[in-house]
Image (spheres, rainbow, N blue to C red):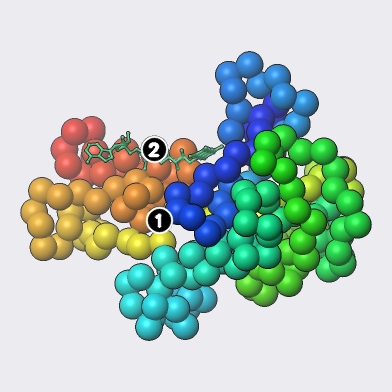
Amino acid sequence: MCPGGLVVPAATAPGEIVVNGMSMSRRDSPFANSGVVVAVEPEDVAAFGGGGIFAGLEFQQSVEQQLFLFGDGSQKAPAQRLTDFVQGKPSANLPDCSYIPGLTPAPLYQLLPSFIYQHLRQGVLEFEKKMRGYYTAEAAVLATESRTSAPVRIPRDPLTFMHPQWEGLFPSGEGAGYAGGIISAAMDGQNVARAAGYLS
Ligand SMILES: Cc1cc2nc3c(=O)[nH]c(=O)nc-3n(C[C@H](O)[C@H](O)[C@H](O)COP(=O)(O)OP(=O)(O)OC[C@H]3O[C@@H](n4cnc5c(N)ncnc54)[C@H](O)[C@@H]3O)c2cc1C
């Protein structure tokens, strides 16, 4: 959650929509934003890329491109009100949002892969039980923050943390597929530094 932050465009190639969230040090925007993550397991993406090592990457691309195709060719993010998203119905209009390219009303409950939608929907309803007011029509759901962790994992030995074939190579952090976010990347870095003998 970035209080006083903004949602930013984060695509790295033409023909895709990717968003991310951040805040400036003053945290003085009138908006808050949070990314809500769904775990994607190898069996979820087995139908992509022939089930090979790039299956996750192809799945990720297919989601990002599908969302782009729904739009008008710009970086406007497909979005809907949170309550409509959960109820599976279109949004007639959208609340104000920090995302500078703007929003396009879109049936995200249809555009997102079904298992992702169902997990998000369930998650939002659970959050509401713990944080009253979370489930509100004033919030917009934007799609999609799809770069939370690398869709490809570089192999490493679970004990030495080294690549099984390249001695001295320690795949670590997000890019190597062992973290998604600041804290998990930091923890993975600590574990690897310890295994490499740089931390006690
Ligand atoms: C806009 C934005 C907002 C984010 N917001 C959040 C958030 O709110 N909460 C959260 O948990 N996570 C957030 N993240 C994700 C978070 O930044 C990453 O998960 C985290 O930084 C990953 O850490 P890392 O050490 O694995 O990789 P990185 O931080 O990417 O570090 C990799 C380093 O390797 C360097 N490098 C790359 N190639 C080479 C090379 N060939 N030689 C030498 N050095 C090289 C890079 O310059 C970089 O410094 C956000 C990311 C972005 C882009």
Residue farthest along the left direction in this orientation: 167
Q: Position of residue 165 (x, y in %)?
A: 11, 63
Residue 89, compared with residue 159, is above or below; it is: below
Task: Identify residue type, mark 1.
Answer: Ala
Q: Nearer the viewer, mark 1 or mark 2?
A: 1
Name the residue beneath numbered marker 1: 150
Residue 128 marker: none
Q: Label 2 CB, ligand 1: below 8 Å?
A: yes
Q: CA distance from mark 1 to mark 2?
A: 15 Å
Give the SS element for disc 2.
Answer: helix
Q: Position of residue 79 (x, y in %)?
A: 75, 54
Residue 68, compared with residue 174, is above or below; it is: below
Name the residue beneath numbered marker 2: 186
Q: Is residue 49 visible?
A: yes
Indicate left or right for 29 with 42 as reference: right
Indicate left or right for 10 with 79 as reference: left
